[in-house]
Image (tube, rainbow, N blue to C red):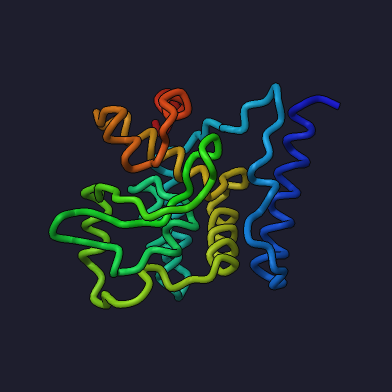
Amino acid sequence: MKPNTVMRELRILRVLIDWAKDERGVEIKDNPARNLRVRGTGDARAPFFTDQDERRLLYELSQISNKNHLRLTKLALTTGFRRSELLSLTWRNIDLKKKLLYIYRKNCAAIDNSTGLKLVPMPEKALKILEELQVRDGKVIELSKGAARNGFDKARKKAGLETLRFHDLRHIAISRMWRSGMNALEISACSGHRDIKMLMRYSHFQLSI
């Protein structure tokens, strides 16, 4: 069996375990399938995402009554944060004046894969999104993992973006940081990448036309 075939099966397994955890309440601390890698494959994809794609996606998200779905995707596109990081973000973690965020983020798997509180600079576009919000108490994004996943999936399908994954938004955001002229140290502070080789994967993605 070819490595890429194994990788496709592994992606399906990841989704099924997430579904069992989020929707069925199975007591699983972490998804073990997300820590597995197949030798001979690169699990990173280069998402082709045009400005028109973004407008369609954001429009479909804006049609959902709960505006947290739209807010979640906008923040993902400006910060490069993972969905889990955004869903766990509270207003106590945010300093709007100093433009800083305190988020719980996993260390590199090569180190110990533990989770700790990290200080992250806040991108200007993310700051504008947060400043527009009137209620500043509790969680920034009031959505469960399952609701967030379902809302995004419905919107991307309606927008005709069948192959887009939420994690692709992280790739897109980091690629835009490269394009905007940010250096590797600045980007790694936002993305959490400690390995420059991993970070460089995002420097050549074609984003828009």
- Would you say 146 lies left or right of 95 here? right
- For the point 70% across and 46% down, the residue is 33
Q: Is residue 121 above or below residue 152?
A: above
- For the point 45% across and 63% down, the residue is 87
Residue 24: x, y in percent?
72, 72
Residue 135: quadrant of the picture: bottom left
**Frontmost residue, 186 versus 112:** 112
For the N terminus, the image quarter is top right
For the C terminus, the image quarter is top left
Residue 147: quadrant of the picture: bottom right
Residue 101: x, y in percent?
28, 56
Q: Residue furthest right?
A: 1
Q: Is residue 63 above or below residue 175?
A: below
- For the point 78% across and 41% down, the residue is 9
**Frontmost residue, 157 versus 173:** 173
Residue 59: x, y in percent?
42, 59
Total residue callouts: 0
- For the point 74% across and 38% down, the residue is 8
